[in-house]
Image (cartoon, grey):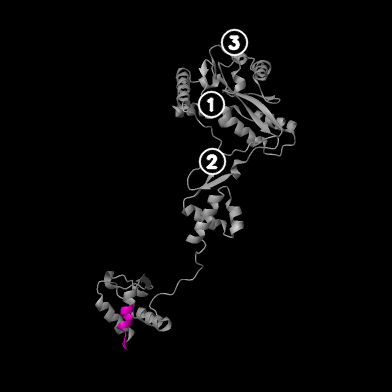
Amino acid sequence: MYRRYVFRIQNMSNCIPLQLPFKKVVFRIQLTREERIEIVLISGERSNRVIAADFNARHPMRPPISYATVSKLLAKFRETGSVLDLPKCGRKKTVTNEETSVAVLASFSKSPQRSTRRMSLESGISRTSLRRILATHKWHPYKLQLLQHLNEDDPDRRTEFAEWAKQKLEQDSQFTQKVLFSDEANFYVNGEVNKQNHRYWSDVNPHWMDPSKTVGTTKVMVWCGIWGTTIVGPFFINGNVKATGYLKLLHDDVFPSLCTEAGTFPEFFQQDGAPPHYGCQVRAFLDEQFPGKWIGRRGPVEWPPRSPDLTPLNFYLWGHLKAIVYGVKIRDVQHLKLRILDACAGISPAVLLSVCEEWEKRVALTI
């Protein structure tokens, strides 16, 4: 119900009216249900102007109504028998009602790894409505992440290593570039699991672990190192690596490749606590090559177990290489090796320098 107010805009200076067009300003005044009924009751046989004046006199504190408002209200009452507005047109949102929401949430509770696309096909509910229901009830698609489970004393050992590294950095700002970080990783001919396609719908973080492994597929084990702004390797290992094979790799391939024209050599050597690295002959060889300056399990500097976040190869190199290597379909083992070699050769020294800076930040965050 509306009333129109018309204002004439004039310039009263010097009493000379300006020839300006009229400007109409419309104020929307909503009548309550009780007010509408009151207008109908007092209507009788009187004109709409009289009814409007009577109503305005009864309610001096509210904005006045016009006779047009009274006319429209009485016409509506005669036509529909009601003073209420007709329901608005448009499709009602019945898809996301309580009954449907309960059914959708029950379905995702039973199969939390089901995608919204598949659920939409099975239920006939649009993906937009499904996402609206899930968002309303604060359900989230948790992404699969590869994590390491820490033991009780691991945080202390991680902090102890980080404090040692921080002390070295305070003594020498270039310390990170003097460490040869090393690690091994498996590359499969049939590619890796695409974690982007794995979601777990839940209203709380389920800390879900995927037990699936790639079994019986052709693979290549790769050893790589990061030394300052240089990639050492990659070197390929046939079959599963053992202590004797790992020692042969270090002696025949890795350390001879470190000889440069400038005669420089890494000051520290880092490896994780994998069983092949723990062999007595391996530790004796490292004691000879890096006396008092190698990092590893039972080494002069103890490497904290289950700390892939502190290894540049884990938090950068392997993920970067696999993203490039698996950019095309791998035909065979030889094709896989060529892709790995090309990917390593394409990493610039500037990127590796940023990786060293990132490692220093992670050391500080660990503390």
- How many C-alpha atoms fall within 10 Å of the one at disc 2: few (<14), some, or many (≥20)? few
Mark in front: 1 vs 2: 2
Residue, disc 1: 356
Mark 3 → mark 2, Cα distance in angstroms: 44 Å
Establish if 148 lies above or below 204: above
- Residue at the extreme front: 110
What type is the residue that disc 3 sits on?
Glu
Q: Residue 73 appears in which quarter of the rendering?
A: bottom left
Q: Which residues are magenta?
A: 37-46
Residue flagged by tag 2: what amino acid is it?
Trp
User: In the shown orientation, is residue 92 left or right of residue 30?
Assistant: right
Q: Left or right? Give the position of 28 relative to 144.
A: left
Is residue 308 visible to us here? yes
Q: Position of residue 287 (x, y in %)?
A: 57, 12
Q: Give coordinates of residue 190: x percent, y percent.
A: 70, 37
Which amino acid is tagged 1?
Cys
Q: Which residue is mark 2?
A: 208
Q: Which residue is mark 3?
A: 288
Whichever of callouts 1 and 2 sits on the residue coming sooner in the sequence is 2
Q: Label 3 to label 1, Cα distance in Å?
A: 26 Å
The Cα atoms of the two marked residues, 1 and 2, are separated by: 32 Å
Indicate the position of residue 96 as horizontal and vertical percent values. Answer: 50, 60
Check residue 52 for magenta coloring.
no
